Each structure stands twice: as C-alpha cells, then as structure tokens.
Image (cartoon, rainbow, N blue to C red):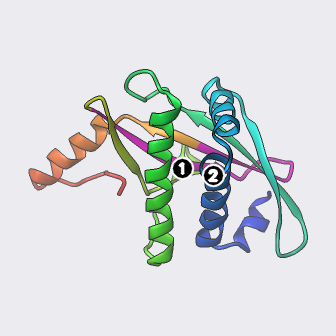
Amino acid sequence: MSRIETQSMSREQFLTIAVNLLHRAFMQEKRTKAKSLFRDVAEGKMVPLTNVQMEDKSTVRFDLSLDHSEYGGSLNFGAFRNSLTTLLGNLANAVQEKREISTFSAEGNVENMIFGVTGVTVERDVPSVMVLSANIGGRDAAVQLRLMYLDYQQFLLSQQQDDDGEASTAVS
C-alpha cells in the first residue's frame, strides 16, 4: 500500500479495518486456529491475515507480526488474548468517540507508525502494555500490522513525572 493510497483513507477507517481483522482472527475464529496463529506470530513469523478490497477496487494484503520482547515473563495465548481484547476495545472506543488518536513514527520512519492507544493488562502481578503499529511503506500492496508490547516501566516513569509537574511522554 503506497503512501498515496493511505492518504485517501482516514486514520479512523484504517483503524476500523485493523480492529475488525484482528478481532476476526483472534476472537471470532475457533480457538485452535486462533492459538495456531498466535504461535506463529509469537515465534517471530509474519503471517498473512487477509486481502481487503479498497474503495478504488485495489486489493491490499494485511499481514500480522508480534513483538513481545518487552513482555514481562513468558507470554501465553490467554495473556496475549487478554491484552489484545483490551487494546481492541480501547481502539474501537477511541474511533467511535471520534477522539484524536496520536501516532508516532517508529525509528524516524513515517511509513512505520505506532498508534497512541494502549491495552494495559496485569498477569501474575506484572503489568503489560500492548500497542498497535502499522508499516504501510512496503513496495508491494501490503500493510504490516504489528502488535507490540512496550516496557510498562516507561509509563510508570511518565506518571511519576506528571505527579512531579514535569512534562509527560506517556501514550494514552
């Protein structure tokens, strides 16, 4: 999906598609198939999710990957699904409420963006923070959705800075 094609789609439309695709793959799908998909992305594979026909009749392939390097502990399907459920709910609410959703460029690359809505969960007394990122800069007609766990301690530090009256860099 080229930059030109994504400019004709609003951020809200893009997030709606992404949320629906992830919901279908992990929540509506049979548990065995969803768990198999989780295993593949947890092993570092990029997995094709589906092809989506756009309004201009072009077809865009959506792929999925997962970065759980910042997850505290050993990630299992149940913990992942809890994180994803929370993240998708928060993203859907933000879109429905027409809230401004911040995006951040990953590593200075404007075609690789992180959406500023989080899914925060606690498993075994350890918090985790999941976000959705997307890479729309591929040469082929593909969008890479990437679920990422962030270091929850950076959010604690941001909260402490807020409490001290300093500037915050937290993602909400």
Which one is nearer the viewer's eye here, 28 or 147? 28
**Looking at the image, is mark 1 or mark 2 nearer the viewer?**
2
Per the rendered image, the range of residues in magenta is: 126-146
| Dominant secondary structure (helix, strand or loop) of the stretch shown in magenta | strand
105 lies above or below 126: below
Percent x, y for residue 72? 37, 26
Residue drawn at x 64%, y 71% is 13
- In the image, residue 142 lies at what x, y percent? 80, 50
Q: Quadrant of residue 21?
A: bottom right
Provide residue 51's location: percent of width, then percent of height: 83, 55
Q: Residues within 10 Å of mark 1 (few under 14, many from 20)?
A: many
Residue placed at 44% from the left, 35% from the top? 79
Whether residue 79 is visible to the viewer of this picture, yes or no, is yes
Q: Please determine whether, in this image, residue 152 is positioned above or below residue 61.
A: above
Q: Can residue 110 be seen in this snapshot?
A: no
- Tag on residue 82? none
Residue that carries the numbered disc 2 in the rendered image: 22
| Residue assigned mark 1 | 132
Instruction: Look at the image and tell me in which quarter the C terminus lies.
Output: bottom left
**Would residue 154 be found to the left or right of residue 76 on screen?**
left
SS state under label 1: strand
Q: Foreground: 119 or 167? A: 119
Which quadrant does the N terminus fall into? bottom right
Note whether 134 is above or below 94 in the view shown. above
The residue positioned 51% from the left and 42% from the top of the image is: 81
Residue at image location 74% in from the left, 61% down from the top: 3
